[in-house]
Amino acid sequence: MISFVWPEGEAMFAGTGGSETYTAGQVRELLRRGIGAQVVSVGHGIKDGRADFPDIPFLSLKTPEEISTIPGRIVYVNRSYDVPTKHKAAIILHCVIPKLADKPRRKADIVNKTVIATSIYSAQQWALYLDVPNSRINVVMPFADPVFSHVARSKTTKRTRILYAGRLHAQKGIYTILEMLHEDEMRGGDFQMTIVMAGQHVVEGKVLARMLDAYPYAKLIQPQKSVLSMAKLLAQTDILLVPSVYAEPFGMLSVEAQHAGCRVIASNIGGLPETNCGLLTLVEPRNPRALIKGIKTAVALGAAVKKDRTKAVAEFTLSESVDELLKVLRYQSKN
């Protein structure tokens, strides 16, 4: 059994971020292999996000001390609890580097644990932040669920279909997109911009959603709550924008989109350059003109052909990711 313990004070909701997508995908693949796996929450009861993931086992605990009773391996997601476990625990650090004031608590999180990051860039940054050798940080790369590689693409249209599917958060570059949409070149009839209204579980997302209500320059759609619905959306998209203005640890959405046959325009910072499956164009962050130039480059390259997609889907597979996780955990079936 491998139990992924969700951070204190948070529920695991679908369509809200890469940590959720990564954890759900890992659990599904482990279950497919006949390895017991579950998500564990503390203090949420049945309001821990399980309704969004009906195919995944959830275990709700009342207190952190109950973690000590769970058989098998414990993998903490982003934060840990200071409780004994039956086997050496691991912690996966999906999040960005915290502020310096949090450093003592974060260093305590990794004591006597196997430490995992989700990109080479992220591993290097965490090693510096935690004052540990880079060799102490294992890398288990994210992935695209096989659904993205199998989804059938829709026919191309006269207008280039552009999608923003990140959270409604300033750090994700939503303001750069809005500024871009007010440029004359984006106001013609050649482009159709769609914005996914994800991230409304936090105040900033709710505020931005109200700002975008009846926005005239983009089509607004609701968050995609399942892998299949997200894959279908990407299959109807020509270009995905990932214009983050901060250093993303990785960028799973970029990989998912390329597996689905989309071209991706992403900021040249953090772990995003590592997401290249052959359909990625990198641009300067915080620069709406750079985004427009990237879009023009993608349009000039044309739609991905079968050969391009075949190459893309060979990168960052779920199977490889789980193989590496099991290797890092030194997991054996008897555990």
Image: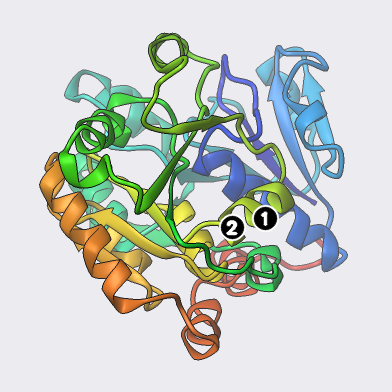
Report the front residue among 157 and 229: 157
Residue 14: horizontal and vertical position, in percent?
66, 34
Residue in the picture at 50% in, 91% down: 307
Q: Is residue 230 left or right of residue 280?
A: right
Q: The disc labelled 1 sits on which kind of residue? A: Lys
Q: Is residue 288 visible?
A: yes
Q: Secondary structure at mark 2?
A: loop
Q: Badge 1: few (under 14), some or many (20 or more) residues near its Cα, within 10 Å?
A: some
- Quadrant of the image occupied by residue 55: top right
Q: Is residue 140 visible?
A: no
* Closer to viewer: mark 1 or mark 2: 2
196 relative to 269, above or below: above
Colour pattern = rainbow
Report the front residue among 141 and 107: 141
Query: Label 1 belongs to which residue?
Result: 232
Residue 141: horizontal and vertical position, in percent?
46, 63
18 relative to 240, above or below: above
Q: Is residue 68 left or right of residue 247?
A: right
Cα distance between the residues tagged 1 and 2: 7 Å
Residue in the picture at 13% in, 52% down: 290
- CB atoms at circles 1 and 2 under 8 Å apart? yes
Q: Secondary structure at mark 1?
A: helix
Query: Label 2 belongs to which residue?
Result: 236
- Quadrant of the image occupied by residue 235: bottom right
